[in-house]
Image: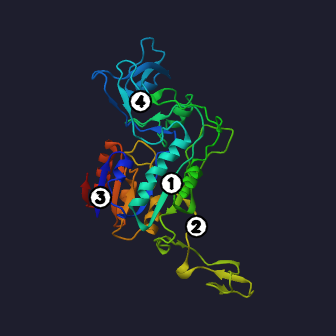
Amino acid sequence: MTVTLLQGDCLEVLARLPAGSVQTCVTSPPYYGLRDYGTASWEGGEAGCNHLGEPVPTRAGFNERYFGIKSSADNKQDALRKPFKQACAKCGAVRIDDQIGLEDTPEAYVTKLVAVFREVRRVLKDDGTLWLNIGDSYWNSTFIRESSSDGWANKGDENYDKYYAGNGGGVGVGGGKRRSTKHPELKPKDLIGIPWLLAFALRADGWWLRSEIIWHKPNPMPENVTDRPTKSHEQIFLLTKSAQYFYDAEAIAEKTEQIRGARPFGGAGNGKQNHDRNDYLYSGDNGTRNKRDVWVVTTQPYPEAHFATFPPDLIEPCILAGSREGDAVLDPFSGSGTTGAVAIKHHRDYVGIELNPKYIDLTRRRLARVQPVLFAEA
């Protein structure tokens, strides 16, 4: 199996890939307004400047424990400086950041993703599919968390709820940026509806929107809220390049027992008639049925990844239904390389794109442990 890892802005990298070169794309873009992945760089200014602003107070002892920063002189607060957002006020350096998810508005975020997936559609074969996992967000003014090597504020971290949600939204910790609350329609605390905003925009851009799959999480992340239910699901959208496309239903068919139920449409069907001619014991061929659109999958953090990751069990049906052995699977937001690990396991080639070079290294180590593979990097 061949693994191709490409580092850079996904839109620019996708533009270099040949048209019709991959069979399926399985991906999860950065969610809107939830995390700064630390990919920013600075241009111009003074080489020795740290581009950090004024200290932002946090809970006593927190920075020393999680960042190795010593307590302040009065021993009452720790201080962690956050970087300037657009330009350094001290030396004039300009902050450059190509990551997706930090846009000022949901509309800008959706517009950028539509452009990315337009390139994905070009790269797909005519019978190709896109499996898109996307989470929702609430409109508020809390700081966007910045990813760090400590991973202190990542989903799945035992300290997430205690120190992020319980600390006024993680004020200033990690140098995150504050999102404006001004929007012509959205009010603070509104659920934005990002998944369907994106799905409708992609449909309008030419994709066939074929299915909404609900990823039900039996172990959802606890939320520090008491005025709404805790969220325990996300969406996966199946979109296609053409009206007719490759989909291997048998590869992901669900096992089932014979079920006594209503008579199938059109008469006997595949059922076995019981004493009551209107009551059937029904099962599909070989004791299977077509896979349903609610998938119960437990979240599974990857030890080396300091951010939320795909569970392999969530990706596997997408790859099995959307491709054959030897086909190429694409993930333009490769992250820790979970899509690649599942693709290799099932004898598919993998093309992964990632903005952060640290995650490219992580993916290389991870995939090398799946089985011997031939790496092709650019």
- Looking at the rendered image, the disc whose residue lies closer to the viewer, 3 or 4, is 3
Rendered residue at 50%/34% (across/down): 144
Horizontally, residue 48 falls left or right of residue 75, namely left
Residue 352 placement (x, y as % from top left)? 35, 54
Q: Which residue is mark 1?
A: 133
Which image quarter: residue 179? top right
Residue 51 placement (x, y as % from top left)? 36, 23
Circle 2 SS class: loop
| Label 3: how many Cα within 10 Å (few below 14, some 14–19, many 20+) | many
Are the residues flagged by discs 3 and 2 in contact, CB closer than 8 Å?
A: no
Q: Is residue 285 visible?
A: yes
- Looking at the rendered structure, which numbered label has been put on residue 292? 2
Q: Which residue is mark 4?
A: 66
Q: CA distance from mark 4 to mark 2?
A: 43 Å
Q: CA distance from mark 1 to mark 2?
A: 17 Å
Circle 3 SS class: strand
Q: Residue type at mark 2?
A: Arg
- Looking at the rendered structure, which numbered label has been put on residue 3? 3
Are the residues flagged by discs 4 and 2 in contact, CB closer than 8 Å?
A: no
The mark that comes first in sequence, 3 or 4, is 3
Q: Residue type at mark 3?
A: Val
Can you say whether 116 is above or below 321 in the image?
A: above
Can you say whether 122 is above or below 308 in the image?
A: below
Q: CA distance from mark 3 to mark 4?
A: 35 Å
| Label 4: how many Cα within 10 Å (few below 14, some 14–19, many 20+) | few
Circle 4 SS class: helix
The mark that comes first in sequence, 3 or 2, is 3
Are the residues flagged by discs 3 and 4 in contact, CB closer than 8 Å?
A: no
Q: Residue type at mark 4?
A: Tyr
- Looking at the rendered image, the disc whose residue lies closer to the viewer, 4 or 2, is 2
